[in-house]
Image: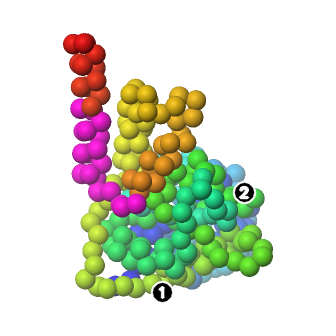
Amino acid sequence: MKVARENISLVLNKPKFAGNVGAVARCAKNMGVEKICVVGGAHLAREEMRPQATHVAQELVDNIRLCDGLAEALADFQYIVGTTARTGSARGPVISPRQMAARLVDISQQNRVALLFGPEDRGLTNEELRWCQLVVNIPTGDFSSLNLSHAVMILCYEIFVAETNPDSFLPKLATAGELEGMYVQIEELLQKIGFLRPENPEYWMMYIRRFLSRRPLLAREVKIVRGICRQLDWFGKNYRKSA
């Protein structure tokens, strides 16, 4: 069984150059990925994308989805893979493109997957990476900076050649929008009970996000977690009243 490439989308967050977007479209077409979303790129002229895309990928350029913000772009995806050249504890554990592709074989069968890339000059921030269930780093030599289209091609190639046991199966997962609603609810509850420090709640929430992302969550599992949060909040309010 191979990756279901029809369920794979490339999400380019605030790319700076139209030519790079065109080159991404060409790479995507080479590897059988047909969907591209550009965040904050309404100012980029499609006519400037076309020479780099070549005539083969013109349709991908024409069908690029434009979004104003990352939340809008990612809300409907069930699984999001972020890319980073920088590593460190704040950016979470990272895996290689080959390991990523192997995981996507099962996940992509029933779920929409986004491969998220940051702008050419700085990549994705820690805040932007919080949307991701998985973070990928492309191993390089002494010089780690890759052109945006080169990074896209490496990930898409690994996806193109990956395959695994045909008997494996992973059901439909919660969307990014559903997960984000759960995290907001968890954060509000933990602030109420004094678990999160008010001056820096995102520090501990980062670790909670990673903990809950170790295993892909189904939509019904997200509903259970949110139900527990509501019940704990209700209990806390009524306990204070009776005390």
Total marks shown come to 2
Q: Position of residue 169 (x, y in %)?
A: 27, 74
Does residue 193 appear left or right of residue 99 in this picture?
Answer: left
Residue at image location 51% in from the left, 47% down from the top: 206
Q: Looking at the image, which is closer to me, 227 or 65?
A: 227
Residue 224 in the magenta stretch? The answer is yes
Q: What predominant SS class does the magenta segment belong to? A: helix
**Residue located beneath label 1 in the image:** 161
Which numbered disc covers residue 122?
A: 2
In the picture, the quarter occupied by the C terminus is top left
The magenta stretch is 214-231
Q: Position of residue 137 (x, y in %)?
A: 60, 69
Amino acid of disc 2: Arg
Q: Residue 119 occupies which quadrant of the picture?
A: bottom right
In the picture, the quarter occupied by the N terminus is bottom left
Amino acid of disc 1: Val
Q: Position of residue 186 (x, y in %)?
A: 38, 38
Q: Residue 28 occupies which quadrant of the picture?
A: bottom right
Residue at image location 36% in from the left, 85% down from the top: 164
Q: Earlier in the sequence, mark 2 or mark 1?
A: 2
Q: Is residue 61 above or below residue 26?
A: above
Q: Is residue 237 above or below residue 84?
A: above
Q: Looking at the image, which is closer to me, 45 or 117?
A: 117
The answer to whether residue 58 is visible is no
Q: What secondary structure is found at the residue carrying circle 2? A: loop
